[in-house]
Amino acid sequence: KKDSEQPVAAPPRAPQSPPADAALSHGARTGGATPDQVALWLSRLSANREGVLFEDATVQIGVKTQYKGPKGVVQLYVGNKSGGQLADCCFSVEWLQGVNGALTLGTGSPLPPKCALEPRQQMQVNCEVFALKPFAACPPLSVSYVSGATPCYLDLHLPVVASKFVEPSPLSKPEFDAQWGKLLFTGDPSVVPSVDKWMKPDTLKALLSNGIHLALAEGQGDTECFGRGTFKGSEQEKTVLVHAAVDAGAKTVAIDVRSDSGELRSALLEQLLSLVAAKK
């Protein structure tokens, strides 16, 4: 599945961290986006290769991605929607334990400390990403610029999740059952209210296979899905199993994840619950 929204490109910004108190604060000219909308964009990108990461009256940040093994490239298209120049544009990523990377301009040249984005123009910033071992959260992405005389700061997250580095590991249902009881990191299934879209088994299976990159075990029932994948880090490779069950009568989805990595289990469980939970 793909988002209906298409990313709009924009110019790449220079790497520099905004002040510590720059938590998603906008000037009156930018309008801003709600935290719920920002979270929804990030959730969609966790299971899609492209889409919108952020948009308000002044800036749009679109994303395209590609991954293979422990390496990935996230292309940020930063567009100036306004009629004025955006000055002192800066980008920085706070890399977490288990994943790191580097920012460059779309041309491959180093990202300058600051740069300007002219009206109705766009720049491309490339982010090379390297997975070392499972990680549980998306790396924070800070964006800052000056619109008119107003400094503006965005506290976002790079849409890099552990499942981007997962590759399918085919298996039979008996093999799934045998491995299910042997994995160290387990927990009770999480049951969340959902929507009609996820009551269709084929849609849920497509999410697990295309969005989370799991191989589905044969012998799936009408209401259950069983999948397995392998996280491909340069330092660690870990296994993850997922059991998803639909209750159309109660309109809920139950998600159970097991792994030989606590970080990998937490990351995929949180991601799946975010995707299938009913949005208010």
Image (cartoon, rainbow, N blue to C red):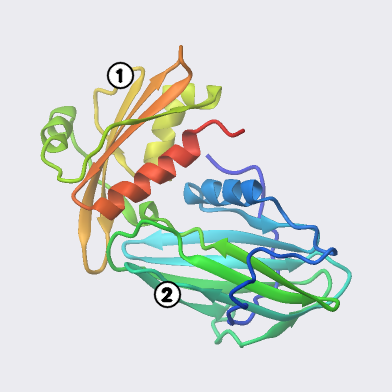
User: Where 239 sits versus 156, above or below?
Assistant: above
- Residue 182 is situated, as x and y percent measured from the top left of the image, at 10, 40
- The residue singled out by tag 1 in the image is 221
- The residue singled out by tag 2 in the image is 101
Most foreground residue, 277 or 131: 277
Most foreground residue, 172 or 228: 228
Which residue is rendered at x = 30% and y = 19% of the image?
221
Q: Quadrant of residue 151?
A: bottom right
User: Where 247 sits versus 257, above or below?
Assistant: above
Q: In this view, does 258 lie to the left or right of 271?
A: left
Q: Are marks 2 and 1 in contact (CB under 8 Å)?
A: no
Q: Quadrant of residue 255?
A: top left
Q: Where the C terminus falls, by quadrant? A: top right
Could you tell me which secondary element the residue under label 1 belongs to? loop
Which residue is rendered at x = 42% and y = 74% of the image?
101
Image disc number at residue 252: none
